Image: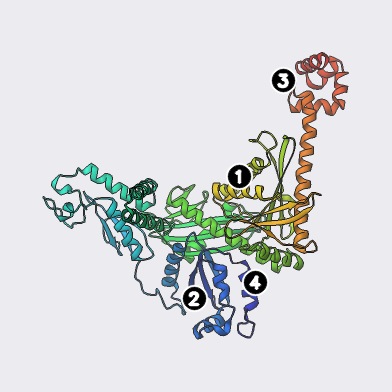
């Protein structure tokens, strides 16, 4: 890491580097005046941005000048590497940064267009001067040309500028159905175009399955060249699937806003989207003054973003309705679907990442975490090879007696300390009998599907109180079912029920043991978390079991519920004392009808 003699702002930059996520995205270097001086993209933001400020002597003169000028860093998390490329291009065109030598021209990315004609064509274009439906932008012409070749090999459609009245050579070589000569009906031709449109939108699961069947059939018939040709087409289709999140340019000009908040702060992400590409992105932290609602905060913040970005968008996409927005917004879209839903999800992922950065930075600078706790969390991050410091850790444990009264508990540690306001209790609803794996799967699915649906921040680390089996169950739910990215660790115990070892998933998806000494501060933190979640789950189980014992004595009586049983026990002290009361005494407590039920049942039994 460079020192202050090279860049006087290095302490601030070093703090920022600790909070940058290991995600694909775009980074912006800013100078002392807040001007963007360099824009870059990265598959791993943390690794790429950090590389500027290490091994200074090995850098080129241009990079050295850049490093000396950087005062602050701004990052935008995106869904894919292609999204990063498109946003980088838009930001360079917008800011014309001093140190960027590429992409300063106003050359546009290529699109595919399905023309608005009686018999539509599929055209390659870099301009929006053709009437029709556009798909793109694409990061380079090669991918687009290959996609055209795939579509051409799968479907027959016309490419001629003017339709004649007799079949041409394209029909003779099998590339066109010759609708001009009446050899293909308009309905059949439009059905073909609709299939092409589905592919361009990314909805081509049936076609992929069909191609795979053709490939396997060719291989079984020993037609290996044909099988290999189909395999190359499959590979290109799968590569096409990894393109930009937004591809339908009918989402022509919109703003997108997402917000997350806690008791003290709100975090807002604002995106400008034009012709399917992100052209502007910013995140801000807002300190609450009067316990304002999210809608009230957005009503104040959005006009500022609207003006700052020089937005001309007639539509704003929001997570909920917001009153009193600028008159330029002719439409508010909340609870969106389709491509607009993808945009809002991207904004939420971005603001979630920004919230974590702000929280981590505040914990490191304002005493939310003691220096020793920060060192412990940094050691834990290195031990588990986590993308960010685990400021928020959640841990689960099950509790039951031979399957009776099954429950689970979850504890959260924030900045290395118990955050009891975030503890959660779970009654197991779908599992019968003593099945710890199924119980763990249920509570993890319930917890994180709710957080994901509500757009709330996910923890930096999930710990299961168990060994390899529990870890595999957690990963199946988190990754395979919910498609979330939460690091998972496990805590195993020895025969004496003491914390014995910590487990993690390695790069190959295999479980590896993390070597920790019993005197290590990380070991003590893990032991504290394990003991706390076990205590919390056991206490909840005891409470439920004691309530269950009382319920079986009174609420088994038809017509008697929990409240009536509670009133009787509160008044008379025990089931035995209730059985000694007269019918009049019971009537005075719960009314004559219910008193008769209790009196008859207890005296009969």
- Secondary element at image label 3: loop
Q: Nearer the viewer, residue 242 or 272?
A: 242
Tell me if residue 572 comes above or below residue 301 in the rendering: above
Report which residue position mark 3 lands on: 559
Q: Nearer the viewer, mark 2 or mark 1?
A: 1
Per the model, the C-alpha gap separating discs 4 and 1 is: 35 Å
Place of residue 5 in the rendered image (x, y in percent of width and height, measured from the top left) = 63, 86
Per the model, the C-alpha gap separating discs 3 and 1 is: 35 Å
Comes first in the chain, label 2 or label 1: 2
Q: How is the image coloured?
A: rainbow
Per the model, the C-alpha gap separating discs 2 and 3 is: 73 Å
- Which disc number belongs to residue 38? 2
Per the model, the C-alpha gap separating discs 2 and 1 is: 42 Å
Report which residue position mark 1 lands on: 445
Relative horizontal placement of residue 259, taking residue 593 as reference (left or right): left
Comes first in the chain, label 4 or label 2: 4
Tell me if residue 381 comes above or below residue 163 in the rendering: below
Residue at the spot 72% in from the left edge and 62% down from the top edge: 515
Which quadrant: the N terminus?
bottom right
Residue at the spot 32% in from the left edge and 60% down from the top edge: 146
Q: Nearer the viewer, residue 575 or 340?
A: 575
Residue at the spot 65% in from the left edge and 50% down from the top edge: 471
- How dense is the environment of label 2, judged by Cα within 10 Å: few (below 14), some, or many (20 and up)? many
Relative horizontal placement of residue 172, taking residue 3 as reference (left or right): left
Report which residue position mark 4 lands on: 15
């Amino acid at each position: 890491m460079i020192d202050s003699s090279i860049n006087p702002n290095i302490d601030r930059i070093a703090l920022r580097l600790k909070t940058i996520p290991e995600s694909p995205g775009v980074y912006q270097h800013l100078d002392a005046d807040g001007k963007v001086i360099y824009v870059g993209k990265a598959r791993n933001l943390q690794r790429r941005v950090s590389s500027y400020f290490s091994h200074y002597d090995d850098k080129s003169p241009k990079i050295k000048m850049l490093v000396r000028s950087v005062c602050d860093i701004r990052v935008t998390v995106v869904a894919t590497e292609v999204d990063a490329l498109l946003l980088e291009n838009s930001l360079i065109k917008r800011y014309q940064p001093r140190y960027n030598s590429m992409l300063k021209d106003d050359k546009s990315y290529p699109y595919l267009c399905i023309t608005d004609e009686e018999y539509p064509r599929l055209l390659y274009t870099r301009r929006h001067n053709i009437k029709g439906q556009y798909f793109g932008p694409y990061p380079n012409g090669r991918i687009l040309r290959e996609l055209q070749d795939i579509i051409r090999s799968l479907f027959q459609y016309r490419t001629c500028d003017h339709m004649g009245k007799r079949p041409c050579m394209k029909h003779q070589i099998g590339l066109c159905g010759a609708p001009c000569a009446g050899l293909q009906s308009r309905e059949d031709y439009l059905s073909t175009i609709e299939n092409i449109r589905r592919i361009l939108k990314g909805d081509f699961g049936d076609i992929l399955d069909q191609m795979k069947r053709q490939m396997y059939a060719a291989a079984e018939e020993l037609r290996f060249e044909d099988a290999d040709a189909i395999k190359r087409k499959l590979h290109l289709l799968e590569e096409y699937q990894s393109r930009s999140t937004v591809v339908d340019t009918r989402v022509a000009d919109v703003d997108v806003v997402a917000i997350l908040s806690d008791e003290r702060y709100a975090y807002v992400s604002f995106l400008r989207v034009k012709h399917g590409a992100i052209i502007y992105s910013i995140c801000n932290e807002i300190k609450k003054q009067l316990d304002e609602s999210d809608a009230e905060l957005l009503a104040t913040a959005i006009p500022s973003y609207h003006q700052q970005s020089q937005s001309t968008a007639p539509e704003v996409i929001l997570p909920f309705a917001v009153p009193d927005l600028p008159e330029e917004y002719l439409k508010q879209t909340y609870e969106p679907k389709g491509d607009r839903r993808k945009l809002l999800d991207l904004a939420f992922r971005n603001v979630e990442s920004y919230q974590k950065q702000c929280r981590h930075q505040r914990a490191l600078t304002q005493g939310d975490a003691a220096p020793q706790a920060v060192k412990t969390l940094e050691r834990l991050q290195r031990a588990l090879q986590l993308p960010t410091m685990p400021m928020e850790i959640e841990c689960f444990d099950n509790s039951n007696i031979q399957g009776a009264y099954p429950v689970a508990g979850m504890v959260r540690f924030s900045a290395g300390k118990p955050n009891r306001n975030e503890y959660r209790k779970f009654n197991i609803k779908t599992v019968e009998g003593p099945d710890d794996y199924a119980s763990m799967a249920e509570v993890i699915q319930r917890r994180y599907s709710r957080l994901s649906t509500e757009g709330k921040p996910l923890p930096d680390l999930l710990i299961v109180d168990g060994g390899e089996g529990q870890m595999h169950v957690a990963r199946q739910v988190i990754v395979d079912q919910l498609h979330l990215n939460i690091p998972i660790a496990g805590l195993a115990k020895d025969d004496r029920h003491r914390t014995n070892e910590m487990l993690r998933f390695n790069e190959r998806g295999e479980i590896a043991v993390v070597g920790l000494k019993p005197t290590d501060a990380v070991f003590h933190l893990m032991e504290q978390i394990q003991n706390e979640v076990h205590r919390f789950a056991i206490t909840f189980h005891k409470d439920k079991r004691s309530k269950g014992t009382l319920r079986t004595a009174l609420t088994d009586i038809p017509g008697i519920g929990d409240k009536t049983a509670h009133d009787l026990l509160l008044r008379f002290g025990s089931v035995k004392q209730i059985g000694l009361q007269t019918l009049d005494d019971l009537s005075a407590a719960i009314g004559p009808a219910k008193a008769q039920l209790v009196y008859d049942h207890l005296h009969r039994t």
